[in-house]
Image (cartoon, rainbow, N blue to C red):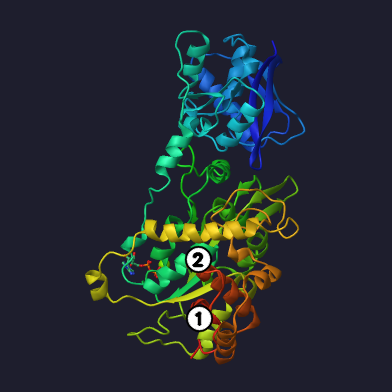
Amino acid sequence: MIAKVQSATLQGLDAMAVTIEVDHYESGQQTKFNIVGLPDSAVKESQERVQSALRVNGYKLPNKTVVVNLSPADVRKEGSGFDLPMALGVMMSYEFLKIKQVERFMFVGELGLDGTIMPVKGILPISIKARELGYEALFVPADNAREAAVVNKLKVYGVHHLKDIVAFFSGLTTLEPTIVNTREEFYSQMFSFDFDFDEVKGQGNVKRAFEVAAAGGHNIILVGSPGCGKSMMAKRLPSILPPLSLSESLETTQIHSVAGKLKKDTSLISQRPFRAPHHTVSDVALVGGGNTFMPGEICLAHNGVLFLDELPEFNRAVLETLRQPLEDRIITISRARYNFTLPCSFMLVASMNPCPCGYHHHPTRKCICTPAQIQRYMNKISGPLMDRIDIQVEVESVPFEDISKAPKGEPSAAIRERVLKARQIQMERYRSLPMGERAQADESPSGTGGRGSRIHCNAQMTTSLLQKYVQLDDAALKLLRTAMQKFNLSARAYDRILKVSRTIADLEAAERVQSHHIAEAIGYRNLDRDNWFE
Ligand SMILES: Nc1ncnc2c1ncn2[C@@H]1O[C@H](COP(=O)(O)OP(=O)(O)O)[C@@H](O)[C@H]1O
Ligand SMILES: [Mg+2]
């Protein structure tokens, strides 16, 4: 008989329902599988796992050809999640198993050779789709059950082994649906960070720069000798950003789900992601793509932080691919087989040594680089990328005695309070913009600047908004002019200084940008000064 079992496959960040039809007919001497309907290689390999799992569990297949049709037939099917529904289809086709009203259920899971059910990627979008299409229950690998159960109004059953499903549908055992109290869990874990700024001793000016960056959504670069604490501080940025909203969390979790990067037993990601790809990362790994689609690091960092440690070591061509996503906060990936658009709204944190040997400007160690070598090193970082970094800060090493003696620093929670207040002011300001000046994108208040072209924070101000919201008095204007001349700052530094000064004023809840705000913002343009190489 023809058996039909419902399953799903991924299409970018979304899932699509797939019906698996199984039939068999007389043919040659041995059991054969014939899978049709644009299966990729992982799907084709299913037949080996399915046959083995059935045999090990005592189901002997007659010497016939089993036809498996994946419908709709014109969409490419990926992954190993069809193993379980295919095995059930074969059993039903041979009448080893009966599932009443099987059309009300969806099944996804990879099979081990003995019938163990193993986790698969992308369960969250599949679960969302199953609810949308009105399925009564979704059967998933036990390790994916909590991820699937984020979706309400859908029964989720996590199963360990093929025989558990058989026993359940034969009425021999019962299965308990997995229930997750998503909201409660999410809010209870929201502030449990692995790292806190109170562990950073000294470095008051750098911590302040991070506070300003977090408050205005500004990208930031840290320049300093090895071991001065750049990576340590960067890792702590998520702890001072506004907490994720539930809808932001769902977006980010979905991306991590599709990439198979969710930790076991995670339901929703409750903190902003921190991604730190190594400098040998390929462009595909950074922005996403590949033969079978995978989201890249920039999408995994969505609503969080992307940290590029040792920036000059990255391949220049790879860094160039960041320009458009930094600007648009979405990335479109087009290949012959697919065309997907994904969100990638992140804050960029970069770090670098001040020179090849690492000790230029170091208080105690001598730098052995020539000015030309330093110049070449600095030139390695791409201009267009530097153009999108508002805050440049020099990090000095804290001497060991000071680190051991120094008291604990200010905790992240206290810094986050101030950041949140400054964000609130920005939300109010940009909310009042007429629709023409802010675009149509979504409403979620993002800690990283938000998706689409809608403005949430100072870092996203256009030149016309800068003119509107940063009107300097005479004293501030004079200071800025003098600094521009004295340090020979570029025109591109000018806009950055204005933007950052707006954030500094917002941290003080000051309506107008004043001289001392400008003065601090000028201090965040270390790399623009033409005396850097001396
Ligand atoms: N200000 C500091 N307070 C406390 N520990 C520090 C500080 N600076 C550096 N350290 C210690 O030094 C280690 C190395 O710092 P790291 O962040 O890796 O340096 P970098 O990335 O600049 O090379 C840190 O893991 C931390 O243990
Ligand atoms: Mg480091």
Residue 348: % across, % down: 54, 63
Q: Quadrant of residue 105?
A: top right
Decide if residue 149 is in sight here: yes
On screen, 328 above or below 10? below
Pick the residue in front: 384 or 436: 436
Identify the mark nearer the N-term, 2 or 1.
Answer: 2
On screen, 399 above or below 51? below
On screen, 331 above or below 137? below
- Which quadrant holds the N terminus? top right
Residue lying at 41% horizontally and 61% vertically, measured from the top left = 415
- Is disc 1's CB within 8 Å of ligand 1? no
Residue lying at 44% horizontally and 35% vertically, measured from the top left = 184
Pick the residue in front: 60 or 211: 211
On screen, 442 above or below 47? below
Separation (CA) of disc 2 from disc 1: 17 Å
Q: Quadrant of residue 17?
A: top right
Give, as a three-letter code, the residue at label 2: Ala
Rendered image: mark on residue 97 = none
Residue lying at 53% horizontally and 19% vertically, measured from the top left = 54
Residue 512: % across, % down: 57, 72
Residue placed under numbered mark 2 in the picture:
509
Give, as a three-letter code, the residue at label 1: Ala
Q: Label 2: state its secondary structure.
A: loop
Residue placed under numbered mark 1 in the picture:
519
